[in-house]
Image (cartoon, grey):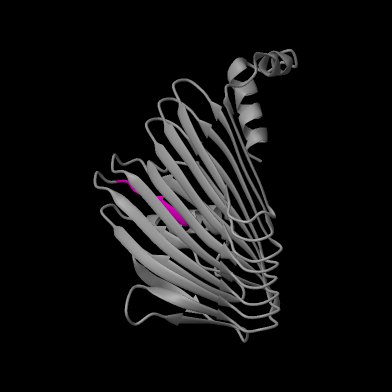
Amino acid sequence: MDMDDKILESLLEEVADLHGVPQGAYNIRLNGQSAGRHSSANIEIVGKTDKPGIDIIIKPGTKNESVHIPALVTHTDVHDLVYNDFYIGDDSDIVIVAGCGIHNSGSQMSEHNGIHRFVLGKNSKVKYVEKHIGVGEGTGERIINPQTIIEAGENSYIEMETTQLKGVDSTIRTTKATAEAGATVIVKEKILTHGKQYAETQFEIDLNGEGSSANLISRSVAKDNSKQKFVSVINGNAKCMGHSECDAIIMDNGVVTALPEITANNVDASLIHEAAIGKIAGEQIIKLMTLGLTEAEAEAQIVNGFLK
């Protein structure tokens, strides 16, 4: 196995928990090109003809299946843009594993911009897992800017888990969603920044249907001289329930800004926002140090537990 193969294997494992070619439907994108694709009986993956990207079409009633679509960059000076559209059939229940890994050992910037759109049919259910990492010994920046657009149909459910805990120099993460009657949108994110890294999260959810709901939960840690910005907007346009929560730990000279916004455009909209930013409590560190940990080890344990 040569070095490029080892890098690819390592990135696949970290962003998609894959050890080799996945079972079922998958599309692997490498340095802006398709490096492997497979459809299943119920999940069809088709390349776009008008722009870079794929359409993923899930047949109605599909249950207990998964699709993997990792995007990997292993060279310096790569600028990747991709559009992936998911069409989720009625009454289906699937898991989608995405994510991006950048290995940059050069001096030029490498970036990935992924625009994902989800169209959920009636009574469908999706769990969407997205991990982002940056590695490599080069001085070139590693930039990942994911955009997610969700159209949640009647009584549908989507739970989105996003994680970025390693090596990404700059990221702007945008998620926009609309929810029809009875639909549920849940977004959980975990972010760790260090050095001079910058991370910005932008949520905007329109709760349009009666009985729709949204829950946005962000956990983040800003270390060294890194900066983070969290913006969440929930618009209650019907009888609905919406909740946003941003909890952040700042360390060293880290900076975190939280801007939650909720707007009730209907008398029966119930909306809540919460934001908390602060350093690790001294008594937490002291308690762990009495068990034999150093101060640095105690801080690491607290951060790891917070971001689980």
Residue 99 visible in the current orientation: no
On the image, which quarter does residue 71 sit in?
bottom left
Query: Residue at the bottom extreme?
Result: 41
Q: Position of residue 142 (x, y in %)?
A: 35, 46
Q: Percent position (x, y) of residue 166?
A: 48, 41
The residue at the point 63 percent across, 34 percent down is 304
Query: For the magenta stretch, what is the residue range?
Result: 99-105
| Residue in the foreground of this view, choosing between 113 and 97 | 113
Above/below status of 40 relative to 183: below
Q: Position of residue 90 (x, y in %)?
A: 66, 80
Q: Residue at x 73, y 15 (%)?
A: 287
Left or right for 212, reference 107: right
- The residue nearer to you, when weighing 305 against 202, is 202
Question: Which image quadrant is residue 229 in?
Answer: top left
Residue 109 lies, with reference to residue 222, above or below; the image says: below
Q: Position of residue 45 (x, y in %)?
A: 50, 80
Q: Identify whether 305 is placed above or below 215.
A: above
- Of residues 211 and 44, the one nearer the viewer is 211
Residue 87 inside the magenta-drawn segment: no
